[in-house]
Amino acid sequence: MSNASSILPDDPAFLKAMITALQAENAKMSAALKAHDHLIQGLRLRIARLKKQVFGKSSEKIEREIAQLELALGDLLIASAEHKTAPVEELEDYTACVQDETSQTRLLRRRPRVSEMPFANAENLIPVIVVLPAAENCALSERMSVKSSA
């Protein structure tokens, strides 16, 4: 500890500059790690959703996409393990989240009924008149004044 303190300069302004530089570097690294973790989580969610859809004519295509996503996820997990020692959460945690999300989004994506949609009839239309303030060098106001005077 005394060896490290002997290396540091005694100038407080220089020390403050070093601290701010280290804090900025730390913030950049934290943002990169968060983005990496979000990418891993997104891949896991996508794989879980695709595994639910493995049926029908396009099941072979979905299976190939799942295989490619699992390979990409494996590469990301290896890269993540090299950079940090904290364990990454497993897929089972995310499959429960996927089921909850899909049920909620299905409720929100309901199309409106025809009876709920407003129709544009001549009775329902309200005329709107827009009055623009006149400007000295405005081309639109010049055209409007020419049309109204003619």
Image: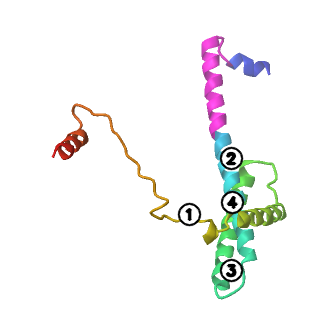
Quarter of the view holding residue 104: bottom right
The numbered mark, 4 or 3, whose residue comes first in the sequence reads: 4
Q: Residue furthest bottom?
A: 57
- Residue 33 percent location from the top left of the image: 68, 46
Mark 2 is surrounded, within 10 Å at the Cα level, by few (under 14), some (14 to 19) or many (20 or more) other residues, namely some
Residue at which label 1 appears: 118
Q: Nearer the viewer, mark 4 or mark 1?
A: 1
Decide whether residue 22 is among the magenta residues: yes
Place of residue 113 in the rendered image (x, y in percent of width and height, measured from the top left):
64, 70
| Residue 145 relative to residue 118: left or right | left
Name the foreground residue: 32 vs 122.
Answer: 122
Bounds of the magenta span?
8-28
- Residue with the mark numbered 3: 63
Task: Nearest to the eye among marks 1 and 3: give it.
Answer: 1
Task: From the image, state whether disc 2 or disc 3 is nearer to you.
Answer: 3
Under tag 1, what secondary structure?
loop
Q: Is residue 135 above or below residue 90?
A: above
- Give left or right: position of 107 versus 126: right
The mark total stands at: 4
Q: Label 2, label 4: how many angstroms apart (C-alpha)?
A: 14 Å
Q: Which residue is mark 4?
A: 42
